[in-house]
Amino acid sequence: MLSYSPATSYDLKRWVASTVGNFWAFAHSQLYDEPARLVADGLITETVERTGRRKRTYEILPAGREALREWLSTTTDEQTEVRDLGLLKLFFANFGDREDVLALARDRHAAHRRRADTYAAQRDELSDYADRWQVKTVELGVRYERCVEQFWADFIKELEEEQQS
């Protein structure tokens, strides 16, 4: 994030929440602890205000940009992690009530629709000022959420058809 602009840990927390936090979970404490490690490693600098709250502002150094370039060039073949409470509940639905399964499907359908709509709005907003890679990231978010939304819509239809027969 510091590649875009110098920032305080609070700034980083806000930026992450509205950008990469959509697909990469961060402990907020990490955004306060990690800059100190990066300063110690010589990848970023730290400037502390002399008065007031003594805010710490971090800025990336050339060595940090080089480390970022190296990281970007490494192979990325790890399995995508999916942590979805709705899928976990669906897996164990055999031990619940049929009405609960239908309610779960409706809740998850609505949640994924809202998330897709939110991503679509972010994509439209980002298109005005962000780089194309940030826009592509959000575009994948839209597509993913629409795909999962469709899964739950199909499942709702299946459950409703079973109820009618």
Image (cartoon, rainbow, N blue to C red):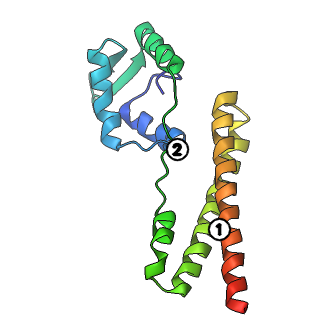
Residue at the bottom extreme of this rendering: 165
The residue at 69%/31% (across/down) is 129
Q: Is residue 118 left or right of residue 58?
A: right
The picture places residue 23, in percent across and down from the top left corner, at 52, 44
Question: Is residue 123 visible in this depiction of the protein?
Answer: yes
The residue at 51%/66% (across/down) is 86
Determine which residue is flagged by label 1: 152
Cα separation, mark 2 vs mark 1, equals: 20 Å
Position of the C terminus, as image quadrant, is: bottom right
The image quadrant of residue 105 is bottom right
The residue at 68%/85% (across/down) is 162
Question: Is residue 119 visible in this depiction of the protein?
Answer: no
Q: Is residue 63 left or right of residue 161?
A: left
Of residue 66 and residue 10, the one placed in the foreground of this image is 66
Count of numbered marks: 2
Q: Is residue 17 left or right of residue 38?
A: right
Of residue 155 and residue 27, the one placed in the foreground of this image is 155
Q: Circle 1 sits in a helix, a strand or a loop, which is it?
A: helix
Q: Circle 2 sits in a helix, a strand or a loop, which is it?
A: loop
The picture places residue 155, in percent across and down from the top left corner, at 66, 72
Residue 23: give its label.
Answer: 2
Of residue 130 and residue 142, the one placed in the foreground of this image is 142
Q: Quick check: 1 above or below 10?
A: above
Q: Quick check: 160 above or below 62?
A: below
Q: Amino acid at mark 1?
A: Trp
Query: In this rendering, which labeled residue sits more in front, label 2 or label 1?
Result: 1
The residue at 45%/83% (across/down) is 96
Q: Quick check: 7 above or below 136?
A: above
